[in-house]
Image (cartoon, grey):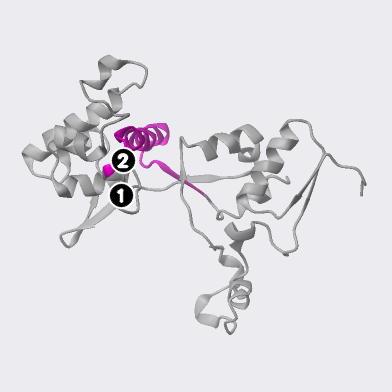
Amino acid sequence: MDEEYDAIVLGTGLKECILSGMLSVSGKKVLHVDRNKYYGGESASICPLDELFSKFGAPPPDESYGRGRDWNVDLIPKFLMANGQLVKLLIHTGVTRYLEFKSVEGSYVYKGGKISKVPVDQKEALASDLMGMFEKRRFRNFLVYVQDYAEQDPRSWKEFDAQNQTMQELYEKFGLDKNTQDFTGHALALYRDDDYLQTAAITTIRRIKLYSDSLARYGKSPYLYPMYGLGELPQGGYM
């Protein structure tokens, strides 16, 4: 093993993988080490299954689980936005050449005792069973506004200052009801709580545009997932 390196990276988590890949692409000589016997750090995909049980101090899995090597369990499951910064970084570092990704089938919400697809474009908004007829048209107009919004073109702002006015004010501008606000904020913009309502609308507009742009990239869903779990991402960096 060589004794001189430009950088030494400790751990094989996703952040360490990206850092190592960026350094390598820049022509740096990198030593990458990990104390664990598996790749991935906190975002590892554990296989076989008995290693997962052992990690958490549980008795070995019984025969009802089938073959242990048929399991890849992510410690921290996380979807990748198809047009997000992480996917762009993976493409830039060349990791995607060695991995296979699958588009997640769709994005859904549970409401009123049934599961419904989250509408993200004009066609889906008009066909959705999540809203009544008049609310559909208001939501369609909202989506058109968000898609046409250009930060450098004041004409697209339609007399709304997204840098200084809140997201709650933007919802009110289009007359969206509480139900529509909820799935827009949580299913499209992916917020965990409602604090975003009192922050500048521009941040939420960017999030919704990312969701929509990611959906347009591969079709059925804005989300991608490595076929064999997130642990594949750091492993791909060493191939």
Q: Is residue 157 left or right of residue 49?
A: left
Q: Is residue 164 left or right of residue 82?
A: left
Verify whether residue 200 appears in magenta. yes
Q: Which residues are magenta?
A: 198-225
Relative depth, front residue between 108 and 66:
108
Say which quarter of the image contains residue 218: top left
Residues at circles 2 and 1 in contact by the CB criterion of under 8 Å: yes
Whether residue 227 is visible, yes or no, is yes
Q: Is residue 207 left or right of residue 29?
A: left
Q: Is residue 55 above or below residue 166?
A: below
Name the residue type under label 2.
Answer: Thr
State whether the magenta stretch is mostly helix, strand or loop.
helix
Name the residue type under label 1.
Answer: Asp
Relative depth, front residue between 60 and 178:
178
- Say which residue label 1 marks: 195
Relative depth, front residue between 118 and 84:
84
Q: Residues within 10 Å of mark 1 (few under 14, many from 20)?
A: few
Label 2's element? loop
Q: Is residue 188 left or right of residue 179?
A: right
